[in-house]
Structures are given as C-alpha cells and as structure tokens.
Amino acid sequence: MKKIATLLLAAGLVFGAATGADAIDFKAKGQWIMSFDYGQNHAFTGGNGRTGNGRGEDEFEANQRVRLQLDAVASEALSGTVYFEIGDQRWGRDGGGVGRGSGGALGADGVAVEVKRAYIDWIVPETDLKVRMGIQGIALPSFTSGTQVFDDDVAGISLNYQFNENVGLTAFWARLYNDNGSYTTASGRTYNNYMDNLDAFALLLPLSFDGVKVTPWAMYAAIGPNSFRGTNPVAGNTNWSNFAGLGGFVRAGMLPVNGSMRKDGSFAGKRWNLYGDAFWAGLTGEVTAFDPFRIAWDVNYGDVRYDDSRSRRHGWLASLLFEYKLDWAIPGLYGWYATGDDNNPANGSERMPTLSANGTNGFSNFAFSGNPYIARDTVLGRTMVGTWGVGARLKDMSFLEDLKHTFRINLIGGTNSKGMAKYISAGGTRNGAWNTLTGANSAGVGMDPLYMTTGDTALEFGLTNTYQMYENFTVMLDANYIATWLDKSRNVWGRSTLNGRSDQVRDPWNVNLSFVYSF
C-alpha cells in the first residue's frame, strides 16, 4: 500500500509540474566555438629562447568555449534568463591551480562552468516601463568602434522607457564591487567590508529621427577606497587589475600603502581614506539620410578624482567614421584621437579613465579587443586611450555566395609624453625597461600591454574571412600583422633589461581559425 501511495504521489508531482510548465515558454540559445591560433611576438619580444608570447602561451594554441542561454517566458511582460559559460578552455591545460582545473588536460572533468548572466525582465503594469534586474550585460552606446568606457557583465538594475518613436530613456544602477574588502587601521583594528563599494549610475537619451540617430549619455561612479582590496591588500588580490583604468600612476599591488607618484617618480606613501568620484559623458550618433553614405561619431570625456590629487585621471577620446555602401562591399575611412599623459606623474594621468571596456572593437581585430570569438587580441591595448589612429577598410566584401572578407589597415601612434616612459618600469626606475611590454599591468597599474608614446608608431594589417558553411555554422579565418617603430632613444625604450638588447623587439602577428556553431 505504501508503495502504491508513493507511486501515486510521484505521479501527482510529475503531472502537477507539467501543468505548471504549460504556462511557461522555454527558449534556448547557444554557441560552441573551437578556435586555433598560431602567432609570435605578442609581447613584442623574441629571441633568447623566448616564444615572444607574454601570456604563458605557446606559438600554437587551441581553445574552446560553450555558451548556453535559457529563457523562461511567462508573457510579453515577464521572463527570466540564465546564461551559462563553459570555458574558455585551453586544450591540454588543467588550469595550473589547486584542485580541479579548467578541464583541458588529460581526463578532462574540469570545473569550468560559470554563470555569465542571470536576470529577470518585467514591465510595470499599465505602463511601457521595462525593467531588468540581476546579472546582465551593460554597454554604453557607440556608433563607431564600440564603447571605450564600459561594456561588461555586472549585477544591477536597468530601466528603459520609450516616450514615442523618436525619444527614449535608459537608466541603470550597477554594483561592480561590494563586500570584498578588509581594512586594518594603524592601531591594528580590522574593518571587514568597510567602504569597499563601487557603484555606477547612468542616464542615456536615445534620439531617433528620419536618417539621424543621436544618443547623449552621462555616468557617475562612487568609488570606495577599499573597492579593489581583498582580505590581503598586497598578495592574492584579484581586484587590482580592475583599477587600471580608474587612476593615475600608482605602484602595482601596493596602492593603499604607497599611494601615488611624486614628480621625481618616487612613491608618495599616502594612504587613501576617502571615496573617489568618477564622471563620464558622451555624445554619439550617426547620419544615414544620405544613403548609401553613412557618417558616425563618438565623443567621450571622463574624470576621476580622489582626495590625493596625484591620483586623478581625466581625458577624452573622439572617433569619426565615413562609410559608403556598395553592392559588393562597404568601403570605410575612420580615425580617432585620445588624450595622453604629460611628463609629470605628480599631476595624475591625462588619459581618459575607463571602467571596463571588454567589448569588440570595430576598427581592429588584433591591436585592440576586436575579435568576436576566441583569439589573441588586445596586443596594443584593451582600449584606444592614449593613442591616435587613422584607418581604412573594405568591409563585408563578397564575390561568392556565403563567403565574406574584411580587409583593414590602421596607422596607430601614441599620445603619451616620451618623458613619462622613464617612470614606466618595475619600481618606477628611470630609463624604463621593456617590462611593460610583457603584458598588461606588468610594471604599473594603469598601463596597457604597450604604453605608446609620441615617439612610437604601429601599422596594423588585418584580413578576416567568414564562410557561412551552414545556416548555423560559421568558419572564420583571421590573419593580422603589426609592424612597429618604437622609440629606442635612451630616455624612452633604449635600454632593455628584459632581453639585454633593444634590437630584440619583434613585430607581433597571428592567424586564427575559428569554427562556430550557433543556434
């Protein structure tokens, strides 16, 4: 009798669940990527038995990634989304840490699943106000290269309201960091999770008219002095690299203790004890009224201030794009300019601050973060701050069905003072070493893989080929080369303690083959 009752109860639960599920429409999306890279000199170095890749990589690497998104849709007014990511997994690598790694080595079985996004969408009853709550992807607007300020997954709330067909309004609050820090006073008293929040607030006003789109926007961020500190402010802290775009010149890993730089390059030793205030504003848009011509622009300004004025960072970046649409391709000319540092480290940085710009870059697949899949990129920098450039491209050339090509060439220079280069080395010593060329933030927080001065120039060539083999299956072959002319004078990059000789600088190049299944 007990067995029969148990079976009836189980059947009731199954049918009850099935009845409830009828009201929910489940939709699934996904993407599998298999990626293969071969390249050299991604850290601008080679010889002396080195591969020239500064990220612990070989010349040939194989990687993969899986993303799965599940939407539970109750109605047009209510739905929930969870977005999982497996990878990136490098074939043959076990993760190198304690316990189960990424699962790329023999035996697989790694712990490599993460929740990328998880949020609910709902509409306020009797209104057109759309609300999204949870971990979501948020990006500031751009009509040219992609945002150079903020584009990432973050926990928060975003609101969207469309007043009419011409005017809309978007607002969001994002909590980037909170409850991660530990602060110990001079007397030895410890405060856990004290003044360690970083919150961002933004307003966007998309305006759309016949042949013209314009979006002015503004964002404010409140930065707690312990936002980037874990339980150990010196070692084992994973948040330090995220300070890179939000301050002036500081000593990596020692910010709360040693603080900012004096004019002679020594460290001030001043502890931060107040919030920082960050502000950004932008005006971006496009004109398509003269089709097939398209003109687009982005203008951004940012300013971050702290109680220690030597840690201030402020600057701007503007970009302009002209395109003409043909039947077989879209030719385009574009350019950008971003402010750079002067030669005084004591007055902070004159580079535009960035919050977290991890999106794709429409101008470059290699020098900046432009590859849409898994590939080696960001060779010069994560963003275009501190650089200028002009470029030309032939986009989406097609001579055969389902096969497209994009060719680009970019001339890139630095806007940072050559006089600042002598401070950009390990410990802030003069006559800078090549240490900054071994990877992002290798010598000082706030530096890109290559800190480009006014005496440095690079020429990037790129060819992207995309073949739509099946409706849901794409094969991409992407080849890139960067020719570099770096200032080898004594006070810039003339001494190389990394290789012993400055003539060991090598031009980076890479070829990527990616197979992408999307549904």
Image (cartoon, helix red, strand yellow):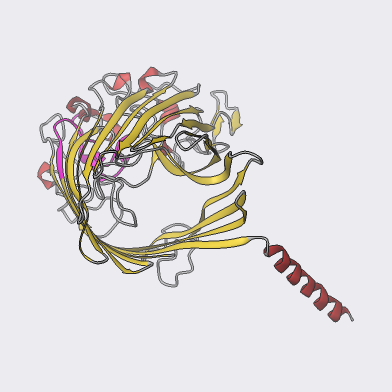
Q: Provide residue 270's location: percent of width, then percent of height.
A: 42, 21
Quadrant of image for the N terminus: bottom right
Q: Is-magenta flag for residue 92?
A: no
Quadrant of image for the C terminus: bottom left
Q: Is-magenta flag for residue 453?
A: yes
Q: Provide residue 138's location: percent of width, then percent of height.
A: 46, 42
Residue 204: tell me if it is visible: yes
Picture quadrant of residue 166: top left
Q: Provide residue 345's location: percent of width, then percent of height.
A: 29, 22
Q: Nearer the viewer, residue 431 or 104?
A: 104
Q: Nearer the viewer, residue 105 or 173?
A: 173
Q: Is residue 98 above or below residue 332?
A: below
Q: Nearer the viewer, residue 348 or 210?
A: 210
Q: Residue at x 68, y 65 (%)?
A: 22
Identify the main secondary structure in magenta: loop
Q: Residue furthest right?
A: 1
Relative horizontal placement of residue 500, taking residue 304 as reference (left or right) = left
Q: Residue at x 17, y 38 (%)?
A: 390
Q: Is residue 489 above or below residue 95?
A: above
Residue range (magenta) = 430-459
Picture quadrant of residue 356: top left
Q: Nearer the viewer, residue 372 or 386?
A: 372
Q: Provide residue 48's location: percent of width, then percent of height.
A: 15, 53
Tally of numbered tags: 0
